[in-house]
Amino acid sequence: MEEIIVDNSSVLELFNIHLKLKDNKRVLFTAPFGSGKSYFLNEFFENSQEYLKITLFPVDYSVASNEDIFELIKFDIFDYLIDHYFEELDLKKDDFSNLLLAQSFVSSKLNLFPFLSSLSKFFPKIEGLVDIIKDTKELINDFKRFKKDVEEGEVEQLLKFMTSIEYKKGSYKERDEFTVLIQDFLKRIKVKRENKEFVLVIDDLDRLDPDHTFRLFNIFTAHHDSKSDTNKFGFDKVIFVCDIPNIEHMFHHKFGAKSNFEGYIDKFYSYKPYFFNHKQYLKEKISDYLDSSFIENSNTKHRKINKDSNFFSDILRLTYKFIDKDILRIRNLKKLTDFSIPDCEIKVKGRSYHVSNFPLLIMTNIMCQFFPRIEDFVRIIGDLSDNYSSNYGTSREVIWNHDYFLISYSIPFFIEIRDIRKNIKITEDLIIGVDNEFGERIFLVYDVKEDWETDSLSFYFKKAVNNTGIIIGKISESEVYINPNPFHVFKKALEICIDNGYIYNDNKY
């Protein structure tokens, strides 16, 4: 079996190296929409022994104001910390002081005096009481102002000013008791968790309309302490998750084509954007997905689907093609459910054949789980055929292409399936004519191998030749085509299967 090669530099390890760069406190994690960014980050941090993570989803804040967004962020952080680290927090009564309760009361903006004034219209007897209260309120305020003017020196006035800014909601200098409490919570948890670094992940920043996207970007930029180069709330690292080309498109649409995008976006990363190699990551995962999803049954003996089989290798090779063309992404992969070799037969000319004899049917059953309809799978194979660099020049030698397994799997559907044991000699080279993508007739040379233990036959494509040798009756003297199109042959075989009812739209046989 030919070995499938994937880059040995794991995407997980490469990201770990990037995250460990000195003073790398802000990371811009970028890849196209639907490429599995969130899935990857969840896997990375779930298996990490060095980091603790909190993820925020800004799409939840899309209808809130800037000031409210920051309050919602605090709420979500508290909610996550209490839900995931309740024991480590060791919460005390003091953590919920009267100050927090008082703030909640004041934020309700309940004002007693307008309320009493309104009542006086209906109850004239309380008008005098209202006047007394108003006069008393003014007197108290006058006294407070006088007292402050007398008692406050310059230092006290300066501290008062700075404190008012720190407690102002939405201010980039905001440092209210909730902010302080979050910082304290993070410290407590880190002490209980061997001082692992805390990472804040801000996911899907580009899934909003441009106004909301840049509002969120600006909020997080404003709440970064540029003097101490620390992140808000004391997080060791902040990861912004998005697709940079998408953000750039929105930026120029909002601020103009000549606006300096690089000067804007570099606030969100310490070194350089991390470009997530989603294709390589998916290739690393696909083998485990397929292997874990396969369920052995009584038909397994007919066609092995394990990591050591040629058939499994062929499935991987086709999925790699899909990944390279961005046809298959992690969202498609997650649709893969448990599968097994179908326990059914197809009938041809009155004779029944178990589908395990035909790897094309098994492969189609597996691959169609990634797509809504069988027609979508055929269309994608057609796209690969249209973009394939075939070469119908001739040579005396066979130049092997590992994609030719598709031709091997297709051959049975170009011939009249019959009892091969009675009608042909298994040891002979056989030949069948098909039209290539240009409508020209070519001839596929193949042989058939019989497995007596499983009572099955396997077809093996050897080469494609022109008709020169066929005319004189000698295949060996025919000229070999350099690189016929295996995807075209595979597509034609799929169409034959659909037309003859071997494959249905619901992928059942």
Image: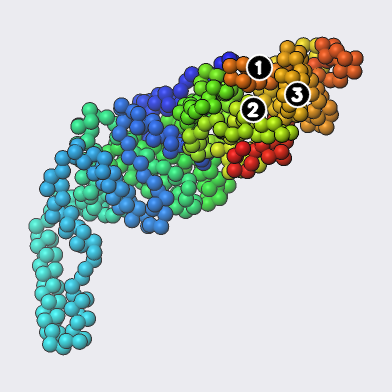
Q: Nearer the viewer, mark 1 or mark 2?
A: 1
| Residue 130 position (above or below residue 463) | below
Dot 3: element? loop
* Along the line of sight, the residue nearer the viewer: 84 or 499: 499
Distance in Å between CA atoms under marks 2 and 3: 22 Å
Q: What is the x, y in percent for residue 469? A: 87, 15
Q: Which mark is residue 484?
A: 3
Circle 3 Cα neighbour tier, 10 Å, few/some/many (<14 / 14–19 / ≥20): many
Q: What is the x, y in percent for residue 370? A: 55, 38
Q: Earlier in the sequence, mark 1 or mark 2?
A: 2
Q: Earlier in the sequence, mark 3 or mark 1?
A: 1
Distance in Å between CA atoms under marks 3 and 1: 26 Å
Residue 26: image quadrant is top left
Q: What is the x, y in percent for residue 272? A: 45, 31
Residue at x-position 39% and y-position 32%: 43
Q: Amino acid at mark 2?
A: Phe
Q: Amino acid at mark 3?
A: Pro
Q: What is the x, y in percent for residue 133? A: 12, 77
Residue at x-position 44% and y-position 44%: 204
Q: Amino acid at mark 1?
A: Glu
Q: Which mark is residue 358?
A: 2
* Along the line of sight, the residue nearer the viewer: 5 or 304: 304
Q: Nearer the viewer, mark 3 or mark 1?
A: 1
Distance in Å between CA atoms under marks 1 and 2: 13 Å
